[in-house]
Amino acid sequence: MIPKATENTISSLLRDELQRLGVRVELFPRITTPAGSREPDLLCVDAGTYPVEAKFTERDLVQAIAKVQNDYLKHHRVLGIKGGFAILYPEELATGPSLFSSSLRRVQASP
């Protein structure tokens, strides 16, 4: 199991990169749906609203796809959601601090 702090850190880096590219993004927003309160990893709000669920394993990615469909897209008319994303973080980011640090340096150094 991946520690939550690691997933949160990667999600915040993704938010920063998307913002650098001009996308308006909220990190861990709370969304009230007809099924209750939800908290996606990210919420992109350019040209529509798009919740983002991010995972480290393919097994969890299937669950993220189901969550996007069942928690958000199912209520798209009420929530004003145009679509959603389920993304798979690179496995190397979850394997340990040294690989994470080198991957982070590569992301920060890219144009």
Image (cartoon, grey):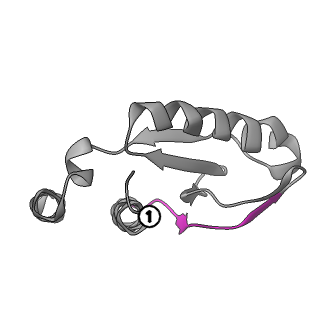
Toward the viewer: 55 or 21? Answer: 55
Toward the viewer: 110 or 75? Answer: 75
Q: Is residue 105 above or below residue 54?
A: below
Q: Position of residue 25 (x, y in %)?
A: 52, 64
Q: Position of residue 17 (x, y in %)?
A: 33, 62
Question: Which amino acid, mark 1?
Answer: Lys
Q: Position of residue 105 (x, y in %)?
A: 11, 65
What is the magenta range?
Answer: 22-32
Toward the viewer: 102 or 77? Answer: 102
Q: Which residue is mark 1?
A: 4
Kindly identify the residue that appears in the image at 80 percent across and 35 percent down: 74
Q: Position of residue 93 (x, y in %)?
A: 23, 53
Kindly identify the residue that appears in the image at 57 percent across and 66 percent down: 28
Q: Is residue 76 left or right of residue 59?
A: right
Kindly identify the residue that appears in the image at 44 percent across and 64 percent down: 4
Toward the viewer: 51 or 103? Answer: 103
Q: Residues within 10 Å of mark 1 (few under 14, many from 20)?
A: few
| Image quadrant in which you'd find residue 69 | top right
Kindly identify the residue that appears in the image at 37 percent across and 59 percent down: 14
| Image quadrant in which you'd find residue 30 | bottom right
Q: Is residue 58 above or below residue 15?
A: above
Q: Is residue 73 left or right of residue 39?
A: right
Q: Is residue 32 above or below residue 70?
A: below
Q: Is residue 35 left or right of residue 5?
A: right
Circle 1 — which element? Answer: helix
| Image quadrant in which you'd find residue 3 | bottom left
Quarter holding the C terminus is bottom left
